[in-house]
């Protein structure tokens, strides 16, 4: 430094100046500071301005003089060395309550070089840079139909803004989300989705959807432990081995479930119009079988159903509702029939109408199933689709049988429903008589010289026998009668006066005779040949066939003859009734021969013999006229 004169002068002057006693000045106060943090809460991503205001300008102040709880100070600046500002940045992943920024005052000096002393502390603030995390738990990990589970979401710190929409729920839904502790723990109810079967189901929380009280949002996702859902209630389908069940038949009913089931009392299979055996399973409960037996006497349907509430699957799900099976056609009305024969008797002249009426149509096999003892069946058929069959019963030729009945073998027939009958159906009784009556004719002698008894013996009683049914050679019949109901008849055969025949017969015209059944005889019956040697008529006596005594008038009734007409069996005609029987006319040549023979017996009797010859010739003429008289009377 350069010296000048002024300096020695000053020094001398000072030395010469009297010394005055002066008091020492007071020491300067150290600078002080106030610290203010603008934000009371510092969260992730936030900062706060820190203002440090000194009591006087200072120097030497830098960030090294600042300490911030839960954060760092940066960007320290001032425009007047009195007020400084800085940026407080919270540290990550920390949570600090009642934090503060502290200024070390000794790091600054004021303009006098006086350093500060002690520290200055800011207002308190809260640093929270921890993201909320969550844990999800369930009250149960297996859910079936009707179950629910409580879902608990526990956060590391209280959160806000949490709703059910922030949860992704597999196999179900959550509802009733709420917190009772300020947002730290939340509960909700998990309801599984109906009708599903799933494993490995989880609930996922989108953590970014929630924020703690500092506003810090979560990050990533939080997943619950896995749980299973089986809300698939067992279902079933029902099948039958046949669609139609008839008498004596059964149907196998099979219920197939969607999954194996248990049924302590058996699955609730039920049927109408029949019964089912208890269902059993041979494959662990997946398939159950039962046997359906129809009720008798049913023409309708059978409904098969299954009460699903009677079964439970392995998860414990109980079935719900009713499974409907096929509708079976039930045909168990047995085939029955009535058999009617229109008449009680079959003869050669009468038939009967057979009518078979079924309870339901029968299309075939009826002829083979019918038995008609003593009769044949013709024209059997149906005009109404098989419900009624008709035919004609004709007695078998040459048959005579007692009471019989038409029988129908119902077991041999099938109705339109396919059902057979049981046993047989029978008609009312009928008889068969197609045997024509026959007869034998016998005279009491084989040489007739006068009235002789003719006996007619029939094979069975007959009615309507009349003298007109008889033709006699060389004589007449009368007094036709029966005393035993028509089996045996008698008549008187009277030879014609003077009749001579070596082989005469009496013939019975059987077609004019009927038995009690109405069967007419057939052909004719002849007596055994017999000889006729009747005495000549007494001269002047009334001859058979003469109009009066000794007249020989054609048309006269012979003594003892009966008027032509029928004779009822058992009725004895009055004496004198009857008709002339047919005669065989004598040959005139024979008469002349006999007369010649008489003439040759001697002259002593010539006159009487001549008279006799004349009588013979007259009688022969009368005999030849008799057939003409009969035809005239007829």
Image (cartoon, helix red, strand yellow):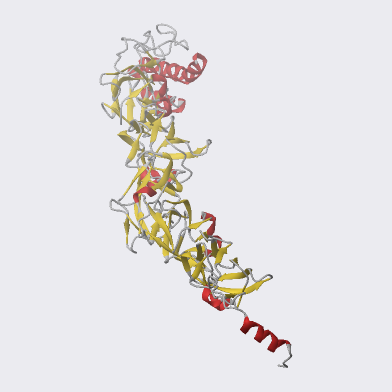
Who is closer to the viewer here, 22 or 174? 22
| Residue 20, above or below 582 | below
Please provide percent x and percent y for residue 481: 30, 17
Residue extending furthest toward the top: 548
Nearest the camera: 233 or 411? 233
Image location (x, y in percent) of residue 549: 40, 6
Picture residue at 51% right of the left edge, 38% below the top: 382
Q: Position of residue 158 (x, y in %)?
A: 46, 58
Q: Nearer the viewer, residue 252 or 399?
A: 252
Residue 257 visible in the snapshot: no
**Can residue 568 be seen here?**
yes
Question: What residue is shown at x 62% (from left), y 79% (from top)?
Answer: 17
The quarter of the picture where residue 371 lies is top left
Q: Which is more toward the observer, 472 or 252?
A: 252
Q: Position of residue 152 (x, y in %)?
A: 41, 58
* For residue 95, side relative to residue 60 (left or right): left
Q: Considering only vertical position in the picture, is 436 above or below 99?
A: above
């Amino acid at each position: 430094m350069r010296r000048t004169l002024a300096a020695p002068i000053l020094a001398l002057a000072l030395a010469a100046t009297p010394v005055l006693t002066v008091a020492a000045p007071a020491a300067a106060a150290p600078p002080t500071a106030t610290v203010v943090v603008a934000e009371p809460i510092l969260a992730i991503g936030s900062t706060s301005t820190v203002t440090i205001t000194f009591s006087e300008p200072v120097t030497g102040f830098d960030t090294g003089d600042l300490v911030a709880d839960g954060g760092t100070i940066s960007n320290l600046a001032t425009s007047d060395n009195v007020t400084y500002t800085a940026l407080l940045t919270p540290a990550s992943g920390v949570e600090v309550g009642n934090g503060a920024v502290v200024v070390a005052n000794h790091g600054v000096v004021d303009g006098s070089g006086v350093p500060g002393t002690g520290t200055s502390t800011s207002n308190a603030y809260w640093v929270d840079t921890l993201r909320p995390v969550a844990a999800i738990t369930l009250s149960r990990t297996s859910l079936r139909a009707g179950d629910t589970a409580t879902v608990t979401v526990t956060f590391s710190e209280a959160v806000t803004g949490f709703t059910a929409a922030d949860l992704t729920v597999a196999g179900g839904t959550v509802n009733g989300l709420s917190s009772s502790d300020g947002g730290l723990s939340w509960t909700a109810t998990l309801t599984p989705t109906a009708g599903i079967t799933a494993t490995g189901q989880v609930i996922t929380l989108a953590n970014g959807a929630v924020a703690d009280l500092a506003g810090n949002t979560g990050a990533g996702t939080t997943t619950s432990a896995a749980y299973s859902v089986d809300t698939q209630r067992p279902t079933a389908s029902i099948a039958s081995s046949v669609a139609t069940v008839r008498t004596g038949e059964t149907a196998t009913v099979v219920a197939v479930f969607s999954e194996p089931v248990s049924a302590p009392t058996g699955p609730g299979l039920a049927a109408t119009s029949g019964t089912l055996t208890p269902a059993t399973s041979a494959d662990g409960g997946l398939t159950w079988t039962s046997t359906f037996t129809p009720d008798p006497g049913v023409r309708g349907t059978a409904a098969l159903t299954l009460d699903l509430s009677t079964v439970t699957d392995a998860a414990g799900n109980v079935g719900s509702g009713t499974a409907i099976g096929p509708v079976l056609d039930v045909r168990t009305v047995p085939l029955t029939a009535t058999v009617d024969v229109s008449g009680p008797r079959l003869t050669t002249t009468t038939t009967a109408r057979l009518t078979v009426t079924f309870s339901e149509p029968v299309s075939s096999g009826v002829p083979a199933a019918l038995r008609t003892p003593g009769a044949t069946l013709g024209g059997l058929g149906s005009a109404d689709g098989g419900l009624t069959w008709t035919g004609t019963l004709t007695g078998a030729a040459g048959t005579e049988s007692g009471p019989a009945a038409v029988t129908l073998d119902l077991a041999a027939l099938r109705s339109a429903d396919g059902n057979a009958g049981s046993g047989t159906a029978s008609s009312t009784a009928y008889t068969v008589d197609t045997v024509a009556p026959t007869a034998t004719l016998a005279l009491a002698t084989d040489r007739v010289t006068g009235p002789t008894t003719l006996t007619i013996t029939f094979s069975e009683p007959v009615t309507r026998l009349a003298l007109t049914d008889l033709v006699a050679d060389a004589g007449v019949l009368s007094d036709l009668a029966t005393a035993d109901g028509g089996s045996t008849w008698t008549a008187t055969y009277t030879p014609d006066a003077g009749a001579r025949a070596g082989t005469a017969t009496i013939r019975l015209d059987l077609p004019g005779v009927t038995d009690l059944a109405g069967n007419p005889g057939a052909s004719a019956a002849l007596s055994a040949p017999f000889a006729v040697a009747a005495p000549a008529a007494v001269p002047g006596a009334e001859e058979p066939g003469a109009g009066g005594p000794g007249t020989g008038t054609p048309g006269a009734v012979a003594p003892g003859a009966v008027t032509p007409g029928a004779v009822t069996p058992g009725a004895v005609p009055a004496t004198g009734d009857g008709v002339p029987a047919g005669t065989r006319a004598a040959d005139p040549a024979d008469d002349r021969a006999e007369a010649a023979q008489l003439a040759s017996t001697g002259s002593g009797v010539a006159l009487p013999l001549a008279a006799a010859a004349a009588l013979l010739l007259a009688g022969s003429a009368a005999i030849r006229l008799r057939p003409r008289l009969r035809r005239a009377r007829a």
